[in-house]
Image (tube, rainbow, N blue to C red):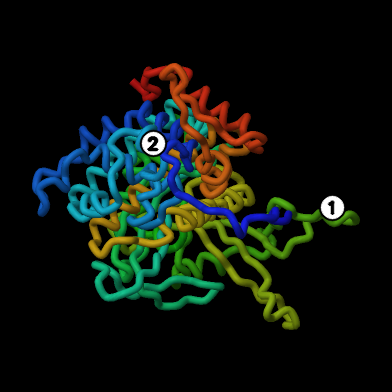
């Protein structure tokens, strides 16, 4: 690909008021409105006192502007100005300047963030009812919980403190803020975010986990989960409080346990002939013996966890052991043991595979970090908390739009959806006062874009949300 001649004499002008950079926001934001986003914000988010009189006016318009900017790729408050360029104000009414939106976010308190979190859960329920966002939700649902540490810089970030994180397999201390998130996924559906709560960087990973799990379970049931719900997490959430919340809600659990003396004794009690190879996806079968070529083996034993607390639970302790690759020359095999505690009814090997798929939540973290959570833009803690919740709402909205677009887009990354569906240039015209978007010829995903547009607007003004 070569640049044609004559560009040294060209004159670039930013002067076209009818050119739109993000035509994909038209069907995406229409889907948000048909799912009742503005109505939910108006009903739930109430900012009665504000430091600046006009800052809290029209929270629905301002929050939808933030979500639209995030869907277009904004990862900072200044970037939200992308929704005001060219002909965007002709497509959308009530488009706010980034300074106004930043001022609005700074009016948030902890209570307002709880209100916005309620909007996130209700919007997810409506999107699930309107689209095939979670296929197979009536059969089996997976609720995953985990946290991450987002680095921040400077001395004026409220709540910023040093916390532990893992980079390239090494534990390091890093200054930042620590969002705790829960997701819902199904066997055939990509994960969506049910809740996200911002915490100080030094907060323990399990802080507030029990209430987050309870909210996620209620949201899953409201969205149509009538079958089995399995809650999964790593060792930070394998404690009596979180497990008790799962038992109280009547759902199954699968959590990693720290190897304390009681767990070590239970592992040591497993007979040598009880271990069996686990059939991981991609495992190879020995052509001579028919056995799996794998050094990973699993076994289980009955175990009573949290025996010293007021909430002891008896269930299955499933242990996966793997040869220590650093000691292959030892006379006897050296094994590393990885136990998790579950009341799943699956066979031992299948239960282990299902538990390890908890890592699917990391794909959500990678998605939002590559998008709105690339940074936490405000100096105020509550403003950053509201920003994180808006990022979760944007993630779910893009995921719902992807399910209406094509099977490939239903499981695509947020960056892919933005590149192929959202960031589509168009020229706005009005022949006979009818709005027409002139999109690029030979756009590779033109048919998928038209499919999304037709499905969203086929219902006219009829709300798509559940009644």
- Residue assigned mark 2: 124
Q: Nearer the viewer, mark 1 or mark 2?
A: 2
> Residue 240: x, y in percent?
34, 57
Which residue extends farthest right? 288
Q: CA distance from mark 1 to mark 2?
A: 46 Å
- Residue assigned mark 1: 290
Marks 1 and 2 close (CB-CB < 8 Å): no
At horizontal 38% and vertical 36% (from top left) the residue drawn is: 124
Q: Nearer the viewer, residue 226 or 316?
A: 226
Instruction: State whether residue 365 is above or below residue 458.
Output: below
Which residue extends farthest front? 9
> Residue 382 sits in which quadrant?
bottom left
Q: Give the tally of numbered discs.
A: 2
How many neighbours does mark 2 have within 10 angstroms: few (below 14), some (14-19), or many (20 or more)? many
Between disc 1 and disc 2, whose residue precedes? 2
Please say whether residue 302 is visible from this viewpoint: no
At horizontal 63% and vertical 37% (from top left) the residue drawn is: 443
At horizontal 51% and vertical 36% (from top left) the residue drawn is: 426
Q: Is residue 11 left or right of residue 158?
A: right
SS of the residue under disc 1: loop
> Residue 375: x, y in percent?
39, 62
SS of the residue under disc 2: helix
> Residue 234: x, y in percent?
46, 60
On residue 153, which mark appears?
none
At horizontal 44% and vertical 26% (from top left) the residue drawn is: 130
> Residue 138: x, y in percent?
48, 29
């Amino acid at each position: 690909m070569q640049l044609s001649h004559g560009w040294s004499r060209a004159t670039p002008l930013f002067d076209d008021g009818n050119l739109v950079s993000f035509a994909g926001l038209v069907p995406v934001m229409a889907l948000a409105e048909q799912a009742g986003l503005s109505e939910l914000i108006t009903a739930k988010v109430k900012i009665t006192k504000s430091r600046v009189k006009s800052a809290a006016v029209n929270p629905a318009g301002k929050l939808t502007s933030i979500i639209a900017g995030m869907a277009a790729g904004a990862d900072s408050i200044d970037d939200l100005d992308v929704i005001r360029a060219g002909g965007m104000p002709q497509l959308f009414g009530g488009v706010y300047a980034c300074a106004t939106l930043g001022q609005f976010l700074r009016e948030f308190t902890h209570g307002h963030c709880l209100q916005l979190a309620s909007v996130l859960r209700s919007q997810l329920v409506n999107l699930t009812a309107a689209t095939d966002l979670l296929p197979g939700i009536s059969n089996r649902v997976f609720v995953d919980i985990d946290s991450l540490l987002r680095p921040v810089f400077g001395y004026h970030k409220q709540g910023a403190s040093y916390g532990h994180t893992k980079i390239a397999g090494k534990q390091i201390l890093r200054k930042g803020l620590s969002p705790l998130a829960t997701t819902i996924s199904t066997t055939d559906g990509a994960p969506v975010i049910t809740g996200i709560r911002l915490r100080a960087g030094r907060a323990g990973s399990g802080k507030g986990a029990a209430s987050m799990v309870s909210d996620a379970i209620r949201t899953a049931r409201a969205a149509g989960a009538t079958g089995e719900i399995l809650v999964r997490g790593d060792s930070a959430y394998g404690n009596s409080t979180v497990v008790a919340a799962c038992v109280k809600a009547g759902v199954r659990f699968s959590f990693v346990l720290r190897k304390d003396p009681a767990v070590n004794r239970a592992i040591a009690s497993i007979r040598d002939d009880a271990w069996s190879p686990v059939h991981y996806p991609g495992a190879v079968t020995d052509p001579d013996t028919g056995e799996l070529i794998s050094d990973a083996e699993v076994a289980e034993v009955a175990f009573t966890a949290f025996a010293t607390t007021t909430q002891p639970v008896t269930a299955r302790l499933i242990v996966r052991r793997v040869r220590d690759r650093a000691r292959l020359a030892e006379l006897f095999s050296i094994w590393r043991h990885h136990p998790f505690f579950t009341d799943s009814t699956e066979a031992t090997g299948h239960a282990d595979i299902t538990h390890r798929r908890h890592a699917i939540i990391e794909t959500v973290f990678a998605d939002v970090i590559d998008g709105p959570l690339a940074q936490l833009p405000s100096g105020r803690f509550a403003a950053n908390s509201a920003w994180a919740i808006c990022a979760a709402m944007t993630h779910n909205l893009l995921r719902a739009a992807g399910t209406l677009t094509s099977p490939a887009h239903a499981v695509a990354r947020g960056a892919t959806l933005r590149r192929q569906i959202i960031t589509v240039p168009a020229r706005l015209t009005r022949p006979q006062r009818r709005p027409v978007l002139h999109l690029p010829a030979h756009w590779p995903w033109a048919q998928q874009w038209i499919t999304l547009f037709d499905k969203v607007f086929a219902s006219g003004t009829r709300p798509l949300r559940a009644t």
